Structures are given as C-alpha cells and as structure tokens.
Amino acid sequence: MSKYTSKIGKINTQDQLIFDFLSDFRNLESVIPKDKISDFEATEDRCKFKIEGIGQAGLKTIEKEPNKLIKITSDGKAPFGFSFWIQLKPIDEEVDTTAIRLTIDAQLNPMMKMMVGKHLQKGIDSLVDYMIIFFNEKVKKE
C-alpha cells in the first residue's frame, strides 16, 4: 500500500455543510469536469462514470462519521484498488472555518508507484485547492 496525504486546506464554511455536500455522490455531477468524465450515474453512496482514456470506474462510500470523515473505496473496475479519506475538523466555529485533508491509500505495485505516485500527490493537493475555492464561492452565492 502506498499512502498519499494532502496538504491541509482551510475552508470558510461550516464542517456540516461541507460534509453534507461531499457525502452524497449525487452532488458531484455539478463539479466534475465534463470534458474528462462522461456517463456519470450516482446514488447517495455509489457512483460510476467513464474516464476519458481510461474507461469505466466507480466509487462507493464505506464509512461516514458526521461532519468529520468520509471514507470511499473503488467499486467495480479500476486500474488499482484504493481507499480515499476526506477528513474535516472545525478550526473556529464562531466564524465557520473548517480544515480539510485528503488521504489516498493505494494498492500500487512498484512500477505503478513510480508511474502514478507523483500524480496522485499532486492530484489530491490540487483537489484541496479546488475544494477551498468551490466551497468559499458556494457560500458567497447563498
């Protein structure tokens, strides 16, 4: 197993609002890149989709701890098995600020680790940046 942990991001939103959005796969359709992902189908706890150049993939939620943790794993075909954690922690409840950190635990053989390891690390750090922007903008609109 190869473990990749993102940087810690700070989102100016309540942990509950972030958790409620991220814990329902049906919400992801509004934020996925349409040019890279197609045939997206989702229920609250499962989703499947087609990734351009890779093929069919799926995700399922295996654990939820309200406002703190969402644990996801691969479901169906995937280039490798993995678990993915989204951790939330209130920083300052008076001003609704939440810390977010992502972790991927991937089953990579040494060759795959060399090929995709840096991309996984860069990807989860970029995802934290995207979530900060998305949730801070989402709150401003509401």
Image (cartoon, helix red, strand yellow):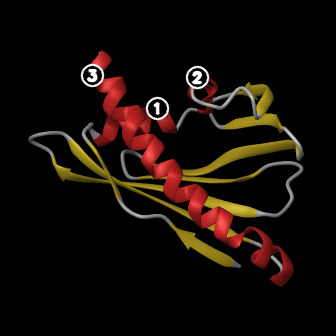
Toward which corner of the image does residue 123 lie, by quadrant? bottom right
Q: Is residue 114 visible?
A: yes
Q: Position of residue 81 (x, y in %)?
A: 79, 63
Query: Residues at badges 1 and 3 in contact (C-beta under 8 Å)?
Result: no
Label located before the other in sequence (1 or 3)? 1
Label located before the other in sequence (2 or 1)? 1
Q: Residue at x 61, y 75 (%)?
A: 3
Q: Nearer the viewer, residue 51 or 87?
A: 51
Within 10 Å of the Cα at label 2, are there few (<14), some (14-19), or many (20+) other Cα atoms? few
Residue lying at the far left of the rendered structure = 94
Q: Which residue is mark 1?
A: 21
Q: Nearer the viewer, residue 89 or 54?
A: 54
In this rendering, the label closer to the viewer, 2 or 1: 2
Q: Position of residue 94 (x, y in %)?
A: 9, 41
User: Real-space Cα distance between discs 1 and 3?
Assistant: 16 Å
Label 1 sits on what residue type?
Phe
Q: Is residue 121 above or below residue 25?
A: below
Mark 2: secondary structure: helix
Q: Position of residue 92 (x, y in %)?
A: 14, 50
Label 3 sits on what residue type?
Lys
Q: Is residue 64 visible?
A: no
Q: Is residue 85 above or below residue 31?
A: below
Q: Residue at x 41, y 40 (%)?
A: 19
Mark sitting on residue 140: 3
